[in-house]
Amino acid sequence: MITFFNIKTGEKRTIDPSLIDPTFVEPAITALWNSGNLHVNATRGQDFGWRLGAETLKRIQDVQEDDMLLSRIASSMQRPLEDLNETDILTWLAKDDAAKEAKKNAQTQGNFQAQYEQELRSQGVGVADAIPSEPQPALPQAPEVSEEDLARQADEAAKKNAKTPEQIQKEKDEEDRLMAELEAEEAEEKRKAEEAEAAGSTTAATNQTAAEQNNPTAAKKAVAKSGSKPDNKSNS
């Protein structure tokens, strides 16, 4: 199972071979990969926000830490080990998921047949009754979806949800405004703190002077200790 997450819309896409036609797995991955930041299209202004999901990134990291598995992947792709990249690992993971799902389906196909026959009998329907007595006309086939169509649909969906330059600029202006307000609040808090500290120092000095005036003896001792002559005016 391969997951993608869109950082612009919050949308999450899960590509699961058990839920979709296995032949659509690789084209779907390619379409989303080419609409994100991991493809050269991103340098041409075509990054529509798609990123590999956290679960898939973890799977890739686990593979990168397994030397034996990396060698096996490189061998299956007939590529030198040192040239193996995340795209190769992602492709291998998708193919491995599809192969496991196909094997699982093959193993359980007989069980499903038995389950179907049991359901028929529970409704009083014979197994032979489920087989048409004569060929029936085929239902209209849905048009095949090419890789280009999938990529185009993904691009159109991404463009529909993409932000315009005006929206981006508006968001930037709003961020700048909020940042300016925050800086102004911090400056105001700092100013108030400095004023409070200055006021506290002034109050302490005033209290000390008043105490000395009310206690001449203590003032004389303080002056004597400092080696200065007492101020007669203060003591009078």
Image: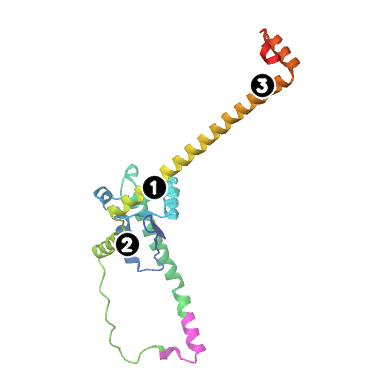
> In this figure, which residue is indicated by the disc labeled 3?
209
Which disc, if any, is residue 175? 1
Q: Quadrant of the C terminus?
A: top right
Query: Colour scheme in the image?
Result: rainbow
Mark nearer the N terminus (3 vs 2): 2
Precedes in sequence: disc 2 or disc 1: 2
Element marked by disc 2? helix
Q: Which residues are magenta?
A: 114-129
Considering depth in this image, is 21 or 135 the residue closer to the camera? 21
Query: Image height check: is 22 above or below 125?
Result: above
Residue 28, disc: 2
Looking at this view, name the residue that lies furthest to the front.
236
Residue at x-position 49% and y-position 92%: 124
Q: Amino acid at mark 2?
A: Ala
* Image depth: mark 2 or mark 1 in front: 1
Q: Residue at x 57, y 33 (%)?
A: 196
